[in-house]
Image (tube, rainbow, N blue to C red):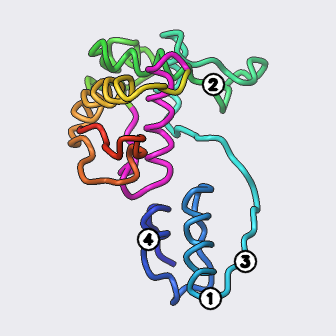
Amino acid sequence: MDNSGSREVATHDIDRYDFVFPSGQPPADLIMSSRLNSGKEAQAYVPFVSPIVLATYRPYALALHDAGVATPMDASREHPLYYEVDISAFVGLTEQGKRWNDIGVREHGIQNNNLVLAHTSDVCLSNSGGTYQGLIAYAKNGSRIPAADGEVTALAESLKPLYRARARPPPTGCPTTCPRRASGSRPSW
């Protein structure tokens, strides 16, 4: 068994494997079309569908709840396991330079002076990283898809600080981070 980002699996030779398990539809479609176009066997199974999930430790979930960013999905439980996160508010904390200590994580037994942000897999190699990038872009754009080239470019520019905050450079040369526009160009990161 090997682990790899879904996009990476979809773009590499997978002949030595009995099966691959990409985490999203885009890489699954790419795998299917690649295999079928090359005359190889391909069969798709969808064992389950899941939403994007941010995993964390309870003190962080509680701090996000205290900050009004996360809401327990089952408020009747004394110690809820699942929370719904307001992604716009979550990204807002990062953009405001808020740190975990600023939003009260110390009151839940730990200290962390790092910025409030989510660490994801590489958006160029992983469907889940790309999905998270799409989610934050959609939230930052007022829950709507950009309609014009200028909007796409401005939105891409607005995401740069979030990559810098993660101490990871913005993606460059990554054809999957931003779809081609009618003009054939991509916004520069």
Q: CA distance from mark 2 to mark 3?
A: 34 Å
Q: Residues within 10 Å of mark 1 (few under 14, many from 20)?
A: few
Q: CA distance from mark 4 to mark 1?
A: 15 Å
Q: CA distance from mark 3 to mark 1?
A: 10 Å
Q: CA distance from mark 2 to mark 4?
A: 33 Å
**Residue corresponding to mark 3:** 43
User: For residue 40, which numbered disc appears in the image?
Assistant: 1
Residue type at mark 4? Thr
> Which image quadrant is residue 38 in?
bottom right
Q: Say whether residue 113 is left or right of residue 100.
A: left
Magenta-colored span: 118-143
> Helix, strand or loop at disc 2?
strand
Residue sticking out furthest to the front: 183
Q: Earlier in the sequence, mark 1 or mark 2?
A: 1
Q: Nearer the viewer, residue 119 or 87?
A: 87
**Residue corresponding to mark 4:** 11
Residue pictured at 47% horizontal, 15% vertical: 89
Placement of 163 over or under 87, stated as above or below: below
Residue 106 sits inside the magenta stretch: no
Residue pictured at 75% horizontal, 23% vertical: 74
Q: Residues within 10 Å of mark 2 (few under 14, many from 20)?
A: some
Which one is in front in this view, the residue at disc 2 or the one at disc 3? Answer: 3
Residue 135 sits inside the magenta stretch: yes
Residue pictured at 53% horizontal, 20% vertical: 62
Q: Say whether residue 150 is left or right of residue 144.
A: left
In the rendering, at what x and y percent does residue 52 appear? 59, 41
In the rendering, at what x and y percent does residue 25 appear? 62, 56
Q: Badges 4 and 1: C-beta atoms under 8 Å apart? A: no
Residue type at mark 2? Glu
